Structures are given as C-alpha cells and as structure tokens.
Image (cartoon, grey):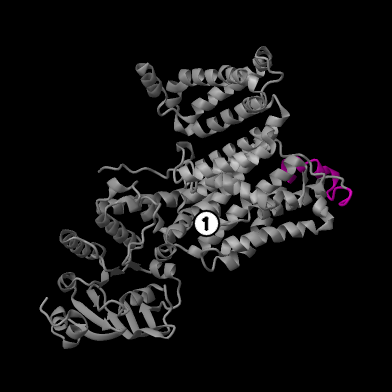
C-alpha cells in the first residue's frame, strides 16, 4: 500500500494543471454520453446538476448513489487520464502551456455545461465572480486599502453598458427603435458589445476617480467610509432615474454574454491584472501597503500608484457588471446593494489576499456553495457564514495568500541563483 | 558647486521648534557625522532633506537645484538615498522584489504597457531585473533573493535596506543609525560595508549614530546638534574636546 501511494505521488508531483483539466474534459465527455443512463441505473431521476449535492441534501437515501455517480463519472476518469498523460504533460514546452490550458479549460467547461442550462448560468456567475474578486483584490489585497464599492462600480458598469446596447441595437419601449442605422445594428454583437462593456468599465473608473481624489490624501478608514457612501449614492441614483426603470429595474438587454464571451472577458481581465501586479508599476501597490513612507522615499510615486490601482479595479468591476447585465437581460438597483459587495468580499477574504490564485479559488468555492446549498433555503445563510468563520479562524489571510499557482506567475527572467 | 547646500533650515512642529538655523555645505566625497542627544532633531533633518517634511523656513540646494517642496520620490530619483532608523522594509516582498521596486523611477513605461505587457515593458523589466541581480551579487545576497526580507536575520535586513537605498544611484546617502541593535562584530562589518560602498559608488555620506566608535572612525567631519541647533562643527578631535558637546551629549567621563 505504501509503495502504491509513493508511486502515485511520484507520478503526479510536478504535473501541470493541464493534466487535471484534460481529465475533467474526458469526464465531461463521458457524462455527456452515458451520464443519464448511469444516473437512471443508480435510481436518480436526472443527471446530478452540481455533483449530486442536491440529492445528498434532500434525499438521504440517494447518498450512496450520488457518491457512486461521482466516482464513476468524475474521479475515476480524471485520475486515469491524469495518470496516463502525466509523463507526457511534463515534457510539454512551456510556450504552448497557456493557450493549451485555455483551450482545454474552455472545452471542458463547454462540454460539462452543455448538458444543462443551469450549469451554464452557474459557470457564467462563477466567471463574473472571479473577475469581481480579482478586481477587489487589487485594492483590498495588493494595496491593503479597504474598498466597499464593488456593488456601486458594478452598477455603473452594468447600467452604462446596458443603456448603450439597448439604445443602439434594440427596439425598446423607452428608448424607441435602435439609434444606429440597420447596417450597424447587425454588428452589435461582435463590435458594439465589447465597446459597450469597455465604456461601462471606463464610466465606472471615472466615478472611481471621484472616490479616489478625496480618500487617497490619507490612508486608513477614509476609503472604506467614502466607498460605502458611494455605493449607497449610486444605488439611490439608479432607483430615482425613471428613464432606466427606477427601482423596478431595466430590461431588454440582448443576452449577448454567453459562456464563451464571459470566458474570454474573464481571461482578458485576469491576464491584464496579472501583468499589472507583476510589473514594477503594480508592485508599487504592495509597497504602499507594507510601508507607504518607505515606498515614497524609494522613488515610488505613491499617489499615482494608489489612483491607478483603484481605477483599474473599478474598470474591471464595471466590465463585470456589464457582463452580468447581459447574462441576465435584466438588472435592478437592488442587485447591486451592500449584499453584492459583501459576497465578493467574502470570496476575497476566503480565497486569499494578494493572490490571483486565491481569488479564483474563493470565488469558485463560495459561488459553488451558494448554488449547491440552495436546497437548504434559509439554512444556507447560516451554514455559509459558519464556514466563513471557520476559514477566518484557521486561515486569517485566506486559503492561498501571497502565493500563485505556477501558471499564473509572470517571470521576467530568472538569473542563476549561484555564481 | 557644492553637492548639498543647506541654508537657514528651520522647522516647527506646531509650537515646537525641532530644527533651528541648520546649515551645511557638502562638497562631495566626504563622510559627515551627525550626533546629538535623542530628540535633538537629527532624524528630522534627514526627513527635511528627503522631502518627508517641508521645512518652515530655509533652502536646500542639491546639485545646485532647490529641492524644497518636491515630493520625496522625486528627491530620491535626483540622487539622495537613505536608510531608516527603524527598519522600513516591505513586509511581504521578497528581497529581489524589494530591490526591483526601488527601481520605480527608472521604468519609463505606462499603465497600458504594463497591462498588456508590451515589448517596451518586457525590455525595461528585464533590464531592471538584471540590475537587481547584479546588486544582489555585489552584496552577496543572491541566495536570499526569494526569501522575504522580513524573514532574514537582522544584520542582513540592514544590508538589504542599504542596497535598496543604493538602487537609485545616489550621490548622497543618508544613514540613520546604521549600527543600532547590532553586536560588536556586526558593527565592524557594517563599518567596512559603509567604507566599501562609499568607494565603489563614489558617495557622499551623512551618518547619524550614537556609537562614538563608528562616528570617530568613519567621519572626517562631525556636526553636533542639541535642541535643533548646531553646537559644534569640526574634526573628530575637535568634537571630542569641545566643552559644549561634552556637556550636552558625551558626558564628562572618558569614553
């Protein structure tokens, strides 16, 4: 037995993450092909949507079936595939590793979610949450400030992008026929939508400037208070803007943010933010957090770093808001309240500060919990905070903080350590 | 043209006069000591030179330019490096990142370059990384490159801070109690290090220190201050025998 575990370990140590994603891809294909038959055989009416958690929570008699299903469909294929290709994967030239990773990951997600509309929706939410959490990490993790403006930034991005898409490309009760000539309306999805999202992000960054200027003169609680106020102001602003539906909400957005679109935007967002925090410009943010005076004396333009970091965070939060609006096709001000901010914060502090890896894990984990524990209804809001508290006690900095997965690191160049 | 010229420097903290009519003329190439009892205003003078405080009155010319009112990062970029009395290293950064971050004013790329990691950004990052490694090599710190500076032993932390101050290629280096909290052995090592960097980087150094051994051995000229005012200025021997210095600071006994 010991030799088996040793062999397993030596086979899997240092295997790149692509190996596991390939395994998941194969598992998703198998589920697509025979998932329903196996589920029926195990006495489950339908294929478990989120790894059988619903069955486990609502029908205890089906717990063994759910576990068998997980083993047969997921664990066994994943491990077998990973075992088979691990030696091959280690030899892969690093040049291809990132594109391959993205293709494999998207393929796996596409096939896995193709079985069920609900899975697609959960994945879209997870991807948007990842974008939100990494953005918040820039200010609250890397820069060590405390911003509570996520909901507000999201709202500005969502409404700005939605007004543009509804106004320009759709026939709407309030905005009338499309503002643009029909020839351009047809280009709405490939060209108009990205532009609308970017303008949404820029609008959000512009309002962030109004928060940044008064609050970054000093450090400390100012940003927390001002950003909290900002969130409430934005929310009541949209509640009182009748032209976008006031508290009833704004609808008619084309549902352009399908899974591939959300995936691409999340990847672009993570890529730019990863680059930023790896550059010397972006490393100014941890410098400000750890010792602002030392940073200033060591030639770091701290004012500029603080404003840029905050605005970048606001930009990507705004883009995420725009994506959210075009996933749902409907938004209302209540969606972007303090609850939204608190959820993203929970994802951040659970996942880990100063780490993109941590943010991804936190967002996936918490969103998964929130969806999977739905059958518990109100009990969900007791269980999730308890889980959070346990995390905070065991790991106050979050699950993975100040470290990155290898594939998320940006190495400029490694000089030999010895000579 | 003198390297550093301070005229009539006065600074008030509210109703407290921390520095009064301080003046200094540094031609370049010397090591000057700044001594005085605790609270005499030594560190305040450093903070005024670096731009952390803006002096109530007076002028500071560095390389012929008045630097009063400039933000600290610009003053440092012009060639004034410093270390701190209490270590001020960045807690979560590795030694390599610490040295790289001190290159902030050398990078010329903007936000867009950083976001998309353009060739311009890559090239400058490579240059800075290379330079950081070179500095680490000179000071024998390569093996600690990936360790967090905070996790290093005290003596090495001091060394990292010194290297960090040298990144901007300063002409003037301000050392605020470089041997505080050190053992005798570490103190001698630090003195050798100071002499070495002075030669290698062609520096002018102002050093604040309470250990007379360090001051008397290293400095060519010493300024003693008390209550923010200069009470003596001269060679180590002159200072040692100056009655005002003995009364205010050194004490009557033989040291």
Q: Position of residue A46 (x, y in %)?
A: 71, 20
Please report the residue visible at 64 percent of the width from the left and 25 percent of the height from the top.
A112
Q: Identify which residue is drawn at 46% across, 42% down.
A: A394
Percent x, y of residue A7: 37, 19
Left or right of B176, for residue A40: right
**Mark 1 crowd level (few <14, some 14–19, many ≥20, 10 Å Cα):** few
Task: Report the front residue among A390 and A96.
Answer: A390
The quarter of the image holding the C terminus of chain A is: top left
Compare residues B7 and B187 and report the one nearer the observer. B187
Q: State yes or no: residue A181 in magenta.
A: yes
Q: Is residue A30 above or below residue A49?
A: above
Residue A246 shown in magenta: no
Tell whether B206 sits left or right of B64: left
Residue A266 in view in this figure: no
User: Which quadrant of the figure has residue A1?
Assistant: top left
Looking at the rendered structure, the secondary structure element under dot 1 is loop
Report if residue A79 is visible in the image.
yes
Q: Which residues are magenta?
A: A173-193
Give the number of callouts.
1
Q: Please provide percent x and percent y for residue B221.
A: 20, 78
Q: Is residue A208 above or below residue A367?
A: below
* Residue A158 higher or lower than A82, as above or below: below
Residue at the outermost top position: A41
Q: Quadrant of residue B255?
A: bottom left
Quadrant in which residue B231 is drawn: bottom left
Give how far across and how far down residue B121 sits, in percent. 48, 51
Task: Please determine whether, in this image, residue A303 is positioned above or below residue A66.
Answer: below
Chain letter for mark 1: B
The residue that mark 1 highlights is B110
């Amino acid at each position: 037995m010991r030799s088996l575990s040793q062999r397993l370990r030596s086979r899997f140590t240092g295997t790149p993450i692509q190996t596991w994603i390939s395994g998941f891809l194969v598992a998703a294909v198998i589920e697509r092909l025979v998932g329903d038959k196996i589920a029926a055989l195990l006495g489950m009416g339908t294929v478990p949507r989120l790894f059988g958690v619903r069955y486990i929570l609502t029908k205890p008699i089906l717990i063994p079936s759910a576990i068998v299903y997980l083993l047969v469909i997921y664990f066994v294929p994943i491990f077998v595939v990973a075992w088979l290709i691990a030696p091959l994967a280690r030899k892969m030239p690093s040049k291809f590793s990132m594109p391959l990773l993205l293709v494999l990951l998207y393929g796996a997600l596409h096939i896995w979610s193709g079985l069920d509309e609900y899975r697609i929706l959960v994945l879209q939410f997870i991807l948007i949450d990842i974008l939100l959490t990494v953005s918040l990490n820039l200010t609250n993790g890397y820069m060590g400030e405390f911003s509570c403006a996520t909901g507000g930034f999201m709202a500005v991005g969502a409404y700005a992008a939605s007004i543009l898409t509804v106004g320009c490309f759709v026939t709407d009760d309030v905005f009338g026929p499309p503002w643009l000539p029909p020839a351009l309306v047809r280009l709405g999805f490939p060209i108009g939508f990205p532009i609308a999202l970017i303008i949404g992000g820029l609008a959000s960054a512009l309002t962030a400037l109004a928060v940044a200027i008064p609050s970054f003169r000093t450090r400390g609680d100012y940003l927390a208070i001002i950003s909290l106020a900002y969130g409430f102001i934005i929310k009541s602003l949209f509640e009182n803007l009748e032209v976008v539906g006031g508290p009833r909400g704004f609808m008619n957005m084309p549902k352009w943010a399908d899974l591939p679109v959300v995936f691409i935007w999340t990847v672009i967002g993570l890529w730019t933010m990863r680059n930023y925090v790896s550059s010397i410009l972006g490393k100014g943010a941890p410098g400000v957090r750890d010792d602002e005076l030392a940073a200033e004396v060591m030639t770091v333009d701290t004012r500029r770093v603080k404003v840029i970091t905050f605005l970048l965070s606001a930009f990507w939060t705004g883009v995420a808001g725009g994506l959210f609006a075009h996933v749902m096709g409907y938004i209302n001000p209540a969606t972007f309240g303090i609850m939204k901010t608190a959820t993203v914060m929970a994802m951040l502090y659970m996942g880990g500060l100063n780490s993109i890896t941590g943010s991804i894990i936190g967002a996936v984990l918490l969103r998964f919990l929130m969806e999977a524990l739905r059958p518990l209804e109100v009990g969900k809001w007791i269980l999730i905070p308890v889980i959070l508290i346990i995390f905070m006690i065991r790991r106050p900095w979050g699950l993975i903080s100040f470290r990155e997965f290898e594939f998320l690191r940006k190495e400029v160049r490694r000089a030999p350590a010895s000579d | 043209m003198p390297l550093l010229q301070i005229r009539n420097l006065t600074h008030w903290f509210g109703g407290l006069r921390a520095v009064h009519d301080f003046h200094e003329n540094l031609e370049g190439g010397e090591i000057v000591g700044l001594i005085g009892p605790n609270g005499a205003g030594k560190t305040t003078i450093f903070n005024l030179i670096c731009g952390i405080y803006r002096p109530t009155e007076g002028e500071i010319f560095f390389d012929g330019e008045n630097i009063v009112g400039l933000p600290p990062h610009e003053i440092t970029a012009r060639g004034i490096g410093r270390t701190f009395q209490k270590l001020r290293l960045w807690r979560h950064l590795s030694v390599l990142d610490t040295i790289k971050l001190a290159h902030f004013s050398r990078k010329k790329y903007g936000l867009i370059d950083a976001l998309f990691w353009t060739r311009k950004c890559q090239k400058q990052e490579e240059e800075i990384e290379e330079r950081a490694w070179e500095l680490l090599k000179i000071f024998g710190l390569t093996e600690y490159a990936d360790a967090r500076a905070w996790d290093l032993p005290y003596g090495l932390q001091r060394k990292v801070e010194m290297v960090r101050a040298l990144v901007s290629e300063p002409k003037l280096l301000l050392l605020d109690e470089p041997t505080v909290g050190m053992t005798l052995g570490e103190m001698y090592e630090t003195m050798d290090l100071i002499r070495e960097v002075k030669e290698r980087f062609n520096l002018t150094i102002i050093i604040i220190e309470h250990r007379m051994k360090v001051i008397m051995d290293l400095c060519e000229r010493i300024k003693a201050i008390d209550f923010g005012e200069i009470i003596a200025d001269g060679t180590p021997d002159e200072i040692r025998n100056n009655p005002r210095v003995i009364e205010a600071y050194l004490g009557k006994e033989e040291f």
